[in-house]
């Protein structure tokens, strides 16, 4: 795949455009950083009252590592890298199927610069926010109510009642994007359910685990405990569901009840996990799914990150796509005075990369969670033959885009 071919005086094209970004997680603040650098005036509106922590640790791989290097945050993220030492797979009764070295998975080789990073999702969100908070207006506990593109810009009415006009609006509001909903229609049109639901939350580390991941499996169910260091323990429960349980996704108590029912007879430490789930205040419950859209923009409103092309946790590429998409969108906007040309360039620049990464679920990237006894046995046989998790050194999809250069910062 080739690089995005854009070479203009980026700050001239930006000409102090005003941009509203909806969503302050990964894609939103990353985009804000690059837009500020090319002279845009940026406002970010976030539905939550503050930056949201929580979630399972995320990976930054391939092309995305180049984005964070160019942002100057590589050293901080490297310090936050989890450095998983061991990955242990368990049977239904909790006995060990295989135990493999976790470090090779991150591409670490003696003396070499680490290729990939794995950090707490909240750490990445904080680092990105810290980078832009002094230069960008953040409106927490608010959201877009209506968008009107009939005038010269986009007239926005916020839920709080305030009204403003922007040159461009960006939906970085995640897989269940309200921006996408209002512009392109209901999520069902673009959502591809991948058959799994998952619940993620933190619980006390009463098991003495340290920088290791233990995963229990039965056909169609998995439970994992991920000790990222210190007292922190990330619990992850996932199970097969051919159709997305919409009520459970929208109502946290219904989500808790569904998970408890699915894992009612489970062994190992799963009963303790289900008990912790009942009291967890950072529960993230969702379905594993992808967003696939024919276009990511309409007029002066455009989508980035999960809102446009969520790849699902099964690819491990959600945050990496968000970082790369934000970079290419900002670059396209900086390089083209005409917003329509910029948004076309954005799609052109990143679509193939998105497609390759979303296809990881079809290319065997989802083998961690087999749904039949036969498939689980095949996976276990494969794991027993491994000393280490497969190295990240040959991952064409993750590294398939060469980034265009921004003009040097002023
Ligand atoms: C708290 C949290 C925990 C997560 N945990 C996991 C996990 O365990 N596993 C996993 O695979 N993915 C998880 N994700 C999703 C993951 O962060 C993304 O897949 C990836 O990082 C791409 O990020 P994004 O910025 O595009 O979207 P997201 O990270 O989903 O961020 C969207 C942001 O938009 C905000 N938002 C939503 N609706 C509105 C609205 N109407 N107006 C304003 N703001 C809005 C949200 O509060 C959020 O801050 C989590 C996301 C969050 C917010």
Image (cartoon, rainbow, N blue to C red):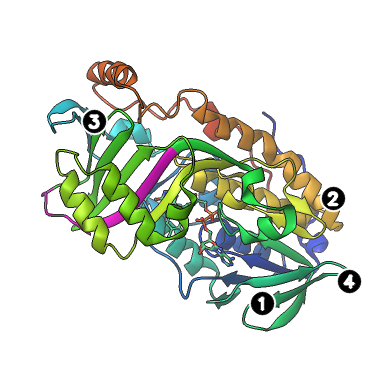
Q: Earlier in the sequence, mark 2 or mark 3?
A: 3
- Crowd band around label 4 with a 10 angstrom C-alpha radius: few (<14), some (14–19), many (20+): few
Q: Earlier in the sequence, mark 3 or mark 1?
A: 3
Rendered image: mark on residue 151: 4
Query: What separation in Å lies between label 3 and label 4 (alpha carbons)?
Result: 58 Å
- Above-or-below relation of 328 to 3: below
- Above-or-below relation of 227 to 165: above
Query: What residue is disc 2 on?
Result: 341
Marks 1/2 in contact by CB < 8 Å: the verdict is no
Single out the mark in the foreground, 4 or 2: 4
From where the camera sits, is residue 82 visible?
no
Query: What residue is disc 1 on?
Result: 158
Query: What residue is disc 3 on?
Result: 101
Front one among 7 and 176: 176
The magenta region covers 196-208
Q: Secondary structure at mark 1?
A: strand
Magenta segment's dominant SS is strand
From where the camera sits, is residue 289 visible?
yes
- Which residue: 30% across, 35% down? 221
């Amino acid at each position: 795949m080739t690089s995005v071919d854009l070479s203009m005086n980026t700050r001239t094209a930006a000409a102090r455009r005003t941009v509203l970004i909806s969503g302050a997680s990964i894609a939103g603040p990353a985009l804000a950083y690059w837009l500020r650098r090319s002279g845009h005036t940026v406002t970010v509106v976030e539905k939550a009252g503050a930056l949201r922590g929580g979630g399972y640790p995320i990976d930054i791989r391939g092309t995305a590592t180049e984005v964070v290097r160019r942002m100057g945050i590589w050293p901080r993220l490297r310090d936050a890298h989890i450095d998983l030492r061991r990955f242990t797979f368990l049977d239904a009764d909790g006995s060990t199927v295989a135990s493999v070295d976790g470090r090779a998975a991150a591409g670490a080789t003696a003396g070499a610069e680490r290729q990939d990073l794995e950090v707490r999702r909240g750490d990445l969100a904080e680092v990105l926010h810290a980078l832009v908070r002094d230069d960008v207006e953040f409106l927490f506990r608010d959201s877009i109510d209506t968008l009107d593109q009939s005038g010269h810009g986009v007239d926005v009415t916020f839920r709080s009642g305030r009204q403003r006009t922007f040159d461009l609006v960006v939906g970085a509001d995640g897989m269940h994007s309200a921006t996408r909903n209002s512009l392109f229609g209901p999520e069902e049109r673009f959502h591809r359910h991948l058959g799994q639901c998952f619940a993620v939350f933190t619980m006390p580390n009463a098991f003495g685990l340290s920088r290791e991941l233990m995963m229990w499996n039965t056909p169609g169910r998995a439970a994992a405990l991920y000790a990222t260091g210190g007292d922190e323990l990330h619990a992850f429960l996932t199970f097969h569901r051919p159709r997305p349980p919409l009520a459970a996704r929208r109502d946290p108590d219904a989500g808790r009840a569904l998970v408890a029912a699915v894992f009612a007879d489970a062994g190992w430490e799963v009963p303790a996990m289900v008990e912790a789930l009942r009291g967890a205040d950072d529960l993230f419950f969702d379905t594993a799914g992808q967003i696939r859209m024919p276009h990511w923009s309409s007029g002066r409103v455009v989508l980035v990150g999960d809102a446009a092309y969520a790849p699902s946790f099964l690819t491990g590429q959600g945050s990496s796509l968000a970082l790369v998409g934000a970079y290419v969108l900002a670059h396209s906007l900086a390089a083209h005075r005409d917003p329509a040309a910029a948004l076309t360039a954005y799609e052109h620049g990143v679509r193939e990369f998105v497609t390759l990464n979303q296809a990881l679920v079809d290319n065997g990237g989802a083998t961690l969670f087999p749904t039949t006894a036969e498939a689980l046995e095949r996976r276990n046989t494969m794991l027993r033959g491994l000393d280490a998790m497969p190295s990240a050194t040959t991952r064409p999809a993750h590294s398939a885009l060469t980034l265009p250069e921004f003009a040097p910062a002023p």
